[in-house]
Amino acid sequence: MRIYALLALIALAPSTQASDPEHVTARRLNRAEYNDTVRDLLAIDFQPAADFPADDFGNGFDNIGDVLSLSPLLMEKYLSAAEKIAQAAILPPPIPKPTIVRHGRGENRGSLKSPGLIVSHRFPAEADYTFVVSVGGRPDPLRLAFSLDGHAFPVADVDRAVDDRGTVEFHAHVAPGEHNLAAELIPGGPPVPDTEFLSGRSKKPLRDPSVGSIEIRGPYNPAPLPPSQSYRRVFTCTDPAGPNSLTCARVDLANLARRAYRRPVTDSEIDALIHFVDNALQHGDSFEQGMQVALTAMLVSPHFLFRIERAPHTQFELATRLSYLLWSSMPDDELFRLASEQRLGDPGVLQAQVRRMLANSKSRALVDNFGAEWLGLRALDSAKPDPGRFPDFNDALLRDMRRETELFFQSIVREDRSILDFIDAPYTFVNARLAQFYGFPEIDSNQFQRVQLPPNSHRGGVITQAAILTASSFPTRTSPVLRGKWILDNLLNAPPPPPPPGVPNLDENAIGSAGSMRQQLEAHRANPVCNGCHAMMDPLGFGLENFDAIGRWRTHDGDFPIDSTGRLPNGKTFDGPDGLKQFLLSDKTAFTKCLAEKLMTYALGRGLEDYDQPALQAVVADTAAANYKFSALIGSIVLHALVPAAPAQGSK
């Protein structure tokens, strides 16, 4: 089996180059696309590509066809992953063993100040479970109200131990899936109504004691597990010949292969897959084992692992282009249906699909994959600010920084807001920790929420978010050079050339004591060799100098007051982050063209060429005419860059 699959990969793996506007380099699914495609094909809920080698980058993204090579190591990983996926999809899952899972106050979904506790938990099976609620505090008489998804248990007395800690046990038969658990203390007296407790408006005199944790023990006496969703994705046939017949195998495999290959399949392709089932039956293996081998072969086929496009283009290829742009995954049933009906090439239908797909939760992939690479969020994985200089920085704060930018990007996509919000917007997303870090009004919740920016906060847009400011700094200090380069690269698409060799570094010990960062850079820029690039980068970065290396607002750099004015080579000037944002917004076309080119590169899986310029200009014009709406940008890219010039009338 493995030898067959390896030979198939070597013989059939495509190797083509882009040579005209209508051609897209055949490209391998990258790790994110592989995971998401397997998820949507088979409802597999693990990450099979987690141990694949890292994908190479080209033109700023890891989905560029020319750099997505197929090494022997990756081929072996594909084979192992395919076997695991096929086994998980077809074999019944093991009966889960009893475990103990503890949820503490750090997970509280209610008010942080409430002595009660609200958590969610995913139950692996329908079974009996025991809930042990831990209570700490003064040994006053206490009672505990406990509920599961809002259904209350009888109120119970808290049994105290000698250390003034107590526990209460509850028992219930629970269906599998996500459920909400709530525990509330009632100091002597009747229970507080659930609505008051859950909203944090209880006026009962709750004193020092609080719920410390909820412990879930089980499952006990689990019910027989029904066929998994993955199993139902594979076995769909109801032919009279029986579900375990070769007739049904052909139906099941044809349906799977059509979706896995993202196009109609031929009889010969189905015959090749049926051969594995037939061979397994002849050797005494079960029907399910034969289907498992056939599914493994399907998952190592080049038609699954690669996005292959051949002339003439088909509407199935258009559906695939669209789905991998917005979802990083295979088309869904509606896209397949429209492609089979030859309706997807209609501009009105396409625009409606763009809006539908952006509103779908799977568009989160556009944030996670395109957004993270465009904005450089993956640099946060290696961000390690100096703990001596920034003692308040920790992993939890870093996660919050990243989450703010992700939610901000997601709001622009899902709410179809103006792309100019990336430059400046009157809102952002924070939780209690990040609000305190920014100096915003206090928020009593560890859940992220949308907030309007306070007056004179100097925040707004991605360039003032802590994630971007941290990713474009050094561990010990800010870098106007890195921040200016980030703006040139990501907002203006005007990257500076690499620095010449032999340029001396800044005197780190002098920064903030013998001179400010600005003074050091101005001396550095006096070198004619350096001035050409730094004359553009440095002024842009100076506009963000009021933010330190982890994004906090400051007024001094060591002993020196911050000078955040910028003067560009063309004579334009600005003052501080607010002035910098106004400068960037003064040329909306430059930013729109930059974002359009980034998205087109991501969509096509290749760098743009001269012959792409008419399409790029059309996208910029269409976006401006639609008040810079995000859906207008995506829709225009689809129409001008992804739709074949002459859609094929057939689908063979």
Image (cartoon, rainbow, N blue to C red):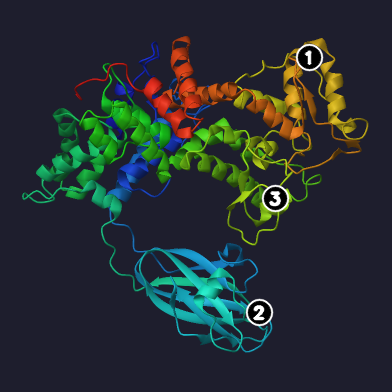
In space, the residues marked 3 and 1 are separated at their CA atoms by 37 Å
In which quarter of the view is residue 373 placed? top right
Q: Which residue is mark 2?
A: 209
In which quarter of the view is residue 420 placed? top right
Question: Type of residue at label 3?
Answer: Asn
- How many numbered marks are there? 3
| Mark 1 residue element | helix
Question: Type of residue at label 1?
Answer: Asn
Marks 3,1: beta carbons within 8 A: no
Q: Residues within 10 Å of mark 1 (few under 14, many from 20)?
A: some
Instruction: Please indicate, yes or no, whether residue 630 appears anywhere in the rendered image.
Output: yes
Marks 2,1: beta carbons within 8 A: no
The mark nearer the N terminus, 3 or 1, is 3
Query: Which residue is rendered at x = 78% and y = 34% of the image?
Result: 545
Q: Which residue is mark 3?
A: 394
Question: Which marked residue is nearer to the observer: mark 3 or mark 1?
Answer: 1
Q: Position of residue 527 (x, y in %)?
A: 83, 13
| Mark 2 residue element | loop
Query: Which residue is rendered at x = 90% and y = 31% of the image?
Result: 510
The mark nearer the N terminus, 2 or 1, is 2
In which quarter of the view is residue 197 placed? bottom right
| Left or right, 239 with reference to 598 | left
Q: Is residue 537 above or below residue 258?
A: above
Viewer-proximal residue, 310 or 362? 362
The mark nearer the N terminus, 3 or 2, is 2
In space, the residues marked 3 and 2 are separated at their CA atoms by 29 Å
| Mark 3 residue element | loop
In space, the residues marked 2 and 1 are separated at their CA atoms by 64 Å
Q: Which residue is mark 1?
A: 531
Instruction: Please indicate, yes or no, whether residue 264 appears anywhere in the rendered image.
Output: no
Q: Position of residue 137 (x, y in %)?
A: 67, 80
